Amino acid sequence: MINSTSGPGLLFPKGGWENDETVEEAAVREAIEEAGVRGDLLDFVGDYNFKSKTHEDEFSPEGLCKAAMFVLLVKEELNSWPEQSTRIRSWLTISQAIQNCRHAWMKEALEYGFCKWLAQKRKTTS
């Protein structure tokens, strides 16, 4: 997880995607830019709706956004990354991550999306 630049609590890397990339490519790019990690996307764990003050405009006055969340198997921690001057990367247990999540929708993605995915993976490997 990474620190929020606008207040307390931790976040998962997130952001918009460019016109020339898929949502999966955007997820990989955001992990590199914000958290300084590279890896393999394993699975999609759900879409989560949230409100963003920075995305309030004439097309979405409420700032409604949708995040696609993925499981990333981290294979490399970069020593240098684009947002390293404003972001701190943290490694946590699942329970620590749930406790420290800044946004309810991210906590929901972790508790229900990721934990459900993890439980299914454990069943198929045991």
Image: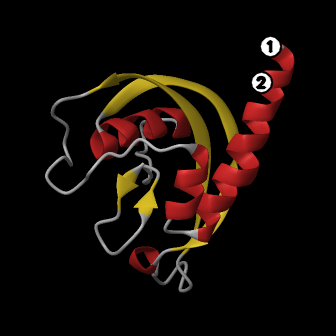
Q: Secondary structure at mark 2?
A: helix
Q: Is residue 47 visible?
A: no
Residue, disc 2: 121
Is residue 74 something that shows in the picture? yes
Residue 99 image-quadrant placement? bottom right
Q: In the image, 34: left or right of 70?
A: left
Looking at the picture, how far across and down is residue 13, in whole percent?
42, 49
Left or right: residue 59 versus residue 2 is right
Label 2 close to label 1 by CB (< 8 Å): yes
Rendered image quadrant of residue 114: top right
Residue 85 place in picture, x, y as percent: 13, 52
Residue 88 location (% of width, % of height): 26, 51
Residue under label 1 = 125
Badge 1 amino acid: Thr
Q: Using the image as rendered, state which of residue 75 and residue 122 is in the foreground.
A: 122
Describe residue 92's horizontal placement relative to residue 120 as left or right: left
How is the protein colored in the picture? secondary structure
Mark 1 residue crowding within 10 angstroms, few (<14) / some (14–19) / many (20+): few
Judge by depth and name the residue closer to the eye, 51 or 123. 123
Residue 49: x and y in percent read 65, 65
Query: Residue at image x 63%, y 65%?
Result: 105
Which amino acid, mark 2?
A: Lys
Q: Which mark is residue 20?
A: none
Residue at 79%, 41% (x, y): give it. 116
- In front of the other: 37 or 49: 37
For the point 49% across and 62% down, which residue is it? Answer: 100
Image point (72%, 46%), residue name = 113
Alpha carbons under labels 2 and 1: distance apart: 6 Å
